[in-house]
Image: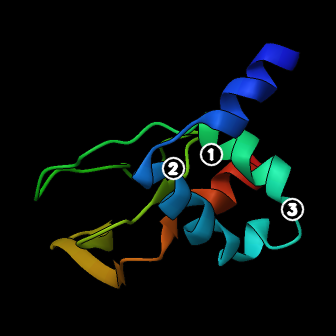
Amino acid sequence: MYMLKKQINTYNDPNFDFMIKFIKKCDLFTNLSEETLRELCYGFKFDFVEMDRYIFHFGDERRVIYFLLSGSVEISTPIKQGRIMIEKLYRGCNIGAYSCLVG
């Protein structure tokens, strides 16, 4: 456990520091200590999602939270005539937090 904490505390990556600042602003994480935030971010995986690719499909049961570091995401739902956009999210938003909390 000590070695992992040492790795976390000495981890030096500009994305890592940005992510800590970023999630501090998210309501889910505002009450977490700096140490807990660092531990949490250390386990994050960065992923690039290409334009027009689905992240979730209606009814998916995923236990993943995506944080938008850049770009935008449209939240839509299927209807008889195709799809309807419900919301458009931009940098600073997260997707999937609610489903992770309620299962």
Is 27 placed left or right of 51 in the picture?
Answer: right
Q: Between residues 68 and 6, which one lies in front from this camera angle?
A: 6
**Mark 3 secondary-structure assignment:** loop
The answer to whether residue 1 of the structure is visible from this angle is no
Q: How far is disc 1 from disc 3 in space, using C-alphas? A: 12 Å
Q: Residue 46 placed where, x, y %?
A: 38, 42
What's the amino acid at mark 2? Answer: Phe
What's the amino acid at mark 3? Answer: Leu
Q: Single out the mark in the foreground, 1 or 2.
A: 2
The quadrant of the image that shows the N terminus is top right
| First in sequence: mark 1 vs mark 2 | 2
Q: How far is disc 2 from disc 3 in space, using C-alphas? A: 16 Å
What's the amino acid at mark 1? Answer: Cys
Q: Between residues 92 and 38, which one lies in front from this camera angle?
A: 38
Q: Quadrant of residue 26?
A: bottom right
Chosen colour scheme: rainbow
Q: Residue 67 placed where, x, y %?
A: 47, 61
Which residue in the protein does label 2 denote? 16
Q: Between residues 38 and 65, which one lies in front from this camera angle?
A: 38
Query: What residue do we see at 34% from left, 80% from top?
Result: 90
The circle drawn on residue 32 is: 3
Q: Residues within 10 Å of mark 3 (few under 14, many from 20)?
A: few
Q: Single out the mark in the foreground, 2 or 3.
A: 2
Q: Between residues 98 and 92, which one lies in front from this camera angle?
A: 92
The circle drawn on residue 41 is: 1
Q: Quadrant of residue 103?
A: top right
Q: Are marks 1 and 2 in contact (CB under 8 Å)?
A: yes
Q: Are marks 1 and 3 in contact (CB under 8 Å)?
A: no
The answer to whether residue 41 of the structure is visible from this angle is yes
